[in-house]
């Protein structure tokens, strides 16, 4: 990973606070990725007692998790209090929903309170979680290792991390259209191989990842820009450019993007990385001493 790359955390907090009121309906990509993550769970044997939605946003994935794991205690964490407030309101609405709708949303044990938390310092005990679900939260961190180490710490042995993130080819059309002088103009995303390396360093076993390209289309470039702002996903690099070099620079960028129009639509490509990994039994104690397992000798014949 490029150590020069960093994100403005204070800016991210402000943007996600504002996006709490606008992201629902504009988060088409996250809803599609959530469905694909859920489908992967069809092929994974997992019966967690506690499930954490890390980076839950407004809680759009919570009904899906409640339906899949109806007997689990469901927790939600996000670093933006306004997002958690929306998630809480969504869940209260689900709890009061009548009959069939409530059954569709899930009726497991009452969830623990939603928690305002930085993913790099989670307020959960070691080994207290069975599953951590994280849908497109990692693009909001510039180094995944501290986050993955915290997830590893809070998972029980045999616990599962299920995640998605964006790869470097995301928004490649916008990156190519905008001027390259005076700083980064498009949010940078971490390569799949670097995420895989971080998973291993964090202590996870048997990581499985794959990548696919999804393309959203828009009638106008402004539609893409509005969706990015509405979801808090626009550029937050510490080295981001201020302004667009005047009207001429913006006009050239629009013309460049317009040249990509096909069948009346403009493309926006996203490199989707999905993965899961397990927390294995430890091989050493916290002080570094090795754990040795003794097996009974089979009886003599």
Image (cartoon, rainbow, N blue to C red):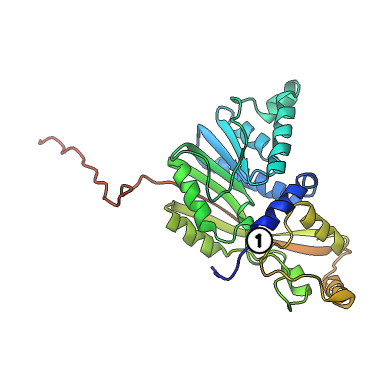
Q: Residue at x 52, y 34 (%)?
A: 50
Position of residue 157 in the picture relative to residue 229 (left or right): left
The quarter of the rendered structure image containing the C terminus is top left
- Secondary element under disc 1, as helix, strand or loop, is loop
- Residue at the far left in the pictured view: 301
Q: Residue at x 36, y 44 (%)?
A: 281
**Are there few (<14), some (14-19), or many (20+) residues within 10 Å of tag 1?**
some
Q: x, y percentage for residue 208? A: 50, 54
Determine whether 66 is above or below 293 in the image: above
- Residue at the far front in the pictured view: 10
- Residue at the far top in the pictured view: 99
Q: In this view of the protein, can residue 255 be seen by the observer? A: no
Q: Residue at x 80, y 47 (%)?
A: 22
Determine whether 285 is above or below 7 in the image: above
Viewer-closest of 38 and 154: 154
The image quadrant that residue 211 belongs to is bottom right
Q: In this view of the protein, can residue 98 be seen by the observer? A: yes
Q: Residue at x 27, y 46 (%)?
A: 291
Q: x, y percentage for residue 193? A: 52, 64
| Count of numbered labels shown in the rendering | 1
Position of residue 123 in the picture relative to residue 17 (left or right): left
Query: Can you identify the residue that label 1 sits on?
Result: 8
The quarter of the rendered structure image containing the N terminus is bottom right
Q: x, y percentage for residue 95? A: 70, 25
């Amino acid at each position: 990973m490029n150590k020069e790359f960093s994100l403005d955390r204070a800016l991210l907090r402000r943007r996600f606070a504002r996006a709490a009121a606008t992201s629902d309906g504009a988060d088409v990509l996250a809803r599609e990725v959530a469905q694909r993550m859920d489908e992967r769970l069809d092929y994974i044997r997992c019966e967690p007692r506690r499930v954490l939605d890390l980076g839950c946003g407004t809680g759009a994935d919570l009904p899906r998790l409640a339906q899949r794991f109806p007997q689990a205690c469901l927790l939600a964490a996000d670093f933006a209090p306004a997002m958690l407030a929306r998630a809480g309101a969504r869940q209260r609405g689900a709890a009061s929903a009548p009959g069939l709708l409530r059954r569709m949303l899930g009726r497991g044990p009452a969830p623990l309170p939603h928690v305002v938390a930085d993913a790099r310092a989670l307020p959960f005990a070691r080994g207290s979680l069975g599953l951590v679900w994280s849908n497109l939260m990692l693009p909001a961190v510039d180094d995944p290792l501290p986050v993955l180490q915290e997830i590893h710490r809070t998972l029980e042995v045999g616990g599962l991390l299920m995640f998605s993130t964006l790869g470097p080819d995301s928004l490649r059309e916008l990156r190519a259209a905008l001027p390259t002088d005076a700083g980064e103009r498009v949010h940078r995303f971490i390569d799949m191989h670097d995420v895989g390396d971080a998973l291993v360093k964090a202590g996870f076993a048997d990581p499985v990842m794959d990548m696919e390209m999804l393309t959203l289309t828009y009638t106008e470039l402004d539609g893409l820009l509005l969706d990015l702002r509405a979801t808090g996903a626009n550029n937050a690099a510490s080295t981001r450019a201020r302004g667009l070099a005047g009207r001429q620079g913006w006009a050239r960028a629009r013309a460049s993007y317009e040249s990509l129009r096909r069948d009346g639509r403009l493309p926006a490509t996203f490199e989707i990385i999905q993965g899961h990994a397990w927390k294995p039994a430890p091989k050493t104690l916290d002080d570094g001493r090795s754990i040795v397992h003794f097996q009974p000798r089979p009886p003599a014949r």
